[in-house]
Image (spheres, rainbow, N blue to C red):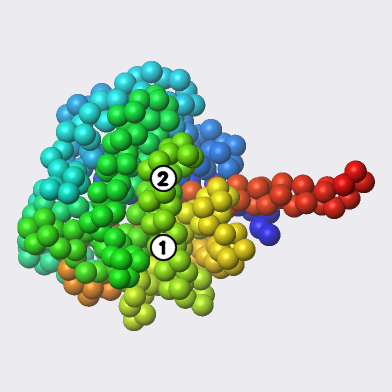
Amino acid sequence: MIHETQLSNLATAAADRLLSYAWKLWFWGDSVGFEGLLDASELTGQEKYRTFVYGVFKGWLARELSRSQFDYTAPGVALLRVYERTGDTALMAAALRHAEYMASFRQTDSGAYVRYENAAIELPPELPPGHPGSEAAREMAEQVIDGGPCIFVDSMHFDGPFFAKLHQLTGEERYRQLALRNILSQLELLFDPAKDLLHHFWMERTRSRNGVLWGRGNCWGLLGLAETLEYLPAEDAGSGSLREALRKILAKMAQLQTVQGGWHTVLDDPESYVETSIAAFMVHVLSRAIELGWIEAEQYSPLVESAVSYMLDHIGPDGLLEGVSYETFPSTRAEHYRHMPRGAVVPWGQGPLLTALWAYARLQRSREVSDAVTRGNEFDPDR
């Protein structure tokens, strides 16, 4: 049992570190970064993190309609969570406009919305000045090819949860349908039934998956499944397929966890390095899935405890989750993922750490309540 004060202190350090990040408004990973800051306020009781997110959204409204290249990665769930807290109708209006924008993309034959029409294959990450890999990255950038239209696993977190949350707040059936249409079509293209895992992306030109089971990519998919399930009504007719997929992927992830509690960046390649953001994502998803009854607590509690230990062992004294890989653009070669540099200070590292700390704290609270009820029943003289 980890005391909640310790979790809160870790969240403070991690969130403070994330506040200094140079947000692009918007880019891959901003969604979980902003959700992490909101969760930091929940766990620590410090409003400064929520206020920061609120302020960024208010600033974004000034240029919202001048869409940037990656506006489809905007943190829609976080936007709606801030609206819930503040009642600021300008945020809801922005969310409704964002929903229309997200629903306007063309679709594949199978119904998946195409967010990225010209996927940059093996585009190198943006490395900080002085990084030893900077020169190699510049050379790689000259060899990038256009992979054409692709469906990415990351979108499972950007799309379904946003529409499901919008349905929860407005009650409009259209948004429920959009939530399910988005995530189920992505699942159809990316889920490998022979592996029970998700591929990083699907290519429209070849009508095939990329063939690499990227660790963080599977976590993006799991988080998308979990949040969509959480925001849809519990009895929703479409929830069954999502729960089944979640359980299959988690069962496979359980088999692939290392003895130290982490996961390899290429999940089925034990020669690839163990990447730490995966453990943080997994703590979040497992904690919510256990608390909400989607998976068996007895079976998965050892898994989440092992992942928590691994995650905590990799938090530096300054709150940085160490060993997080830089932005990983698409490739059909596992070698590309194996050699991705680590050590990034990014929202897809700090954000999952913060959401994991809050989800784990909530799981511990629910366990304490359950234990108290059990003890009360044991000593109930009327039983």
Residue to which mark 1 is pinned: 248
**Outermost residue, top side:** 89
Q: Residue at x 66, y 47 (%)?
A: 365
The spot of residue 248 in percent (x, y) is 41, 62
- How many C-alpha atoms fall within 10 Å of the one at disc 1: few (<14), some, or many (≥20)? some
The spot of residue 53 in percent (x, y) is 41, 34
Amino acid carrying label 1: it is Lys
Alpha-carbon distance for marks 1 and 2?
A: 14 Å
Q: Camera-side residue: 31 or 148?
A: 148
Q: Is residue 334 visible?
A: yes
The label number, if any, that marks residue 82 in the structure image: none
294 is higher (above) or lower (below) than 331: above
Amino acid carrying label 2: it is Ser
Residue to which mark 2 is pinned: 239
67 is higher (above) or lower (below) than 6: above
- Residue 238 relative to residue 311: left or right: left
Q: Secondary structure at mark 2?
A: helix
Q: Residue at x 43, y 52 (%)?
A: 243
- Whichever of labels 1 and 2 marks the residue nearer the N terminus, that label is 2
